Image (cartoon, grey):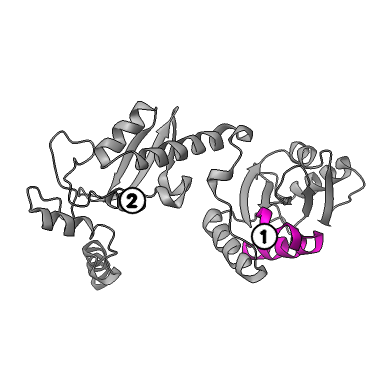
Amino acid sequence: MIAKIIEGRSFGGCVGYVLKQDSEIIHANGLRTDSAKTIVQDFNFQRMLNPRLGKAVGHIILSWNTADKNMLNNDIMVSSAKRYLAKMGIRDTQCLMVRHHDRKHDHIHIIYNRVNDHGKTISNSNGRYKSFKACKELNALYGFKKSEGKQNVNRGRLKSNDRTKYQIYDTVKAGIRNSKNWTELRSFLRYRGVEIQFKYRSGSEEIQGISFSKNGQVFRGSAIDRSLSFGQIDKALNCIDNSKELYQTPFSGSPAVLSADNSIGKSIDEVAAALFTIADIVPEEEDPLIKKRKKKENYRLKR
């Protein structure tokens, strides 16, 4: 099971889309389900308890692997959806669950009011992280199969940001397979309209993250897919039998070794050793930046 989270401003538009032909309402809370009109009226009536909230429409799509088809029914879907909402902190509010039958994989649409029954706003902070964690726990609990992966997504049905994300995903994956180092990867992507931007640790040349841009849209690598984080790409490139190869530091004009201390001209063995220490995680208590921050805090307390 995987989840896609969307927020919007119009209950009418969202309900109208979800209640299309070949759909089935499998659960409702705090709503009259006589028609789409009464559902929208009830959502909007509660929304007026907090009229300042612009994006009051919560919309979540829960999708299951095609291998789970034989074990799924409405009761299982509603049960897992309720557990998912609880783990996301979405409670005490109106909710509509609708099952669609227009795809090979089973999926449901959940519409909920971000203005709860008491007029308070339901938080959306850290939504992606909480959603990933919730799906992982529920997959283990129910025995659902993992996602089939991005390679099986129907690109033709994608729109806007999702289309660009998948275009970048496909291009970067192809680039990794056809590149021996970062310089070749950057050239491969640029020729196909994708640019790389690196995020550096403040005050240093240490790379912390990576983003990709295409058609004016910028996405963090890990937001596109976890395999597109800087660490994962660097690891993949090093596995293509080039762990002893020197390559240029991105955005610099002179050859350099991308190593733990950014030094140049080391021996091949030292270079290989440095490359494999890039992904090491420095314990919090040994991080010099954290130590410096703690010293400042202690200094303020003494004053």
Q: Quadrant of residue 80?
A: bottom right
Residue at the right extreme, as displayed:
34
In the rendered image, the quadrant that contains the C terminus is bottom left
**What's the amino acid at mark 2?**
Ala
Circles 1 and 2 in contact, beta carbons < 8 Å? no
Determine whether 224 is above or below 70 in the image. Answer: above
Can see residue 8?
yes
Q: Position of residue 63 (x, y in %)?
A: 67, 52
1 or 2: tag closer to the N-terminus: 1
Question: In terms of image quadrants, where is residue 65?
Answer: bottom right
Q: Where 182 falls versus 64 (above or below)?
A: above
Residue 90 numbered mark, or none = 1
At 27% from the left and 63% from the top, the residue drawn is 280
Residue 17: percent from the left, percent from the top?
76, 38
Relative to 299, is 111 on the left or the right? right
Task: Determine the image quadrant of residue 16.
Answer: top right
Q: Nearer the viewer, residue 212 or 153?
A: 153
Residue 165 x %, y %: 50, 38
Magenta-tinted stretch: 64-89
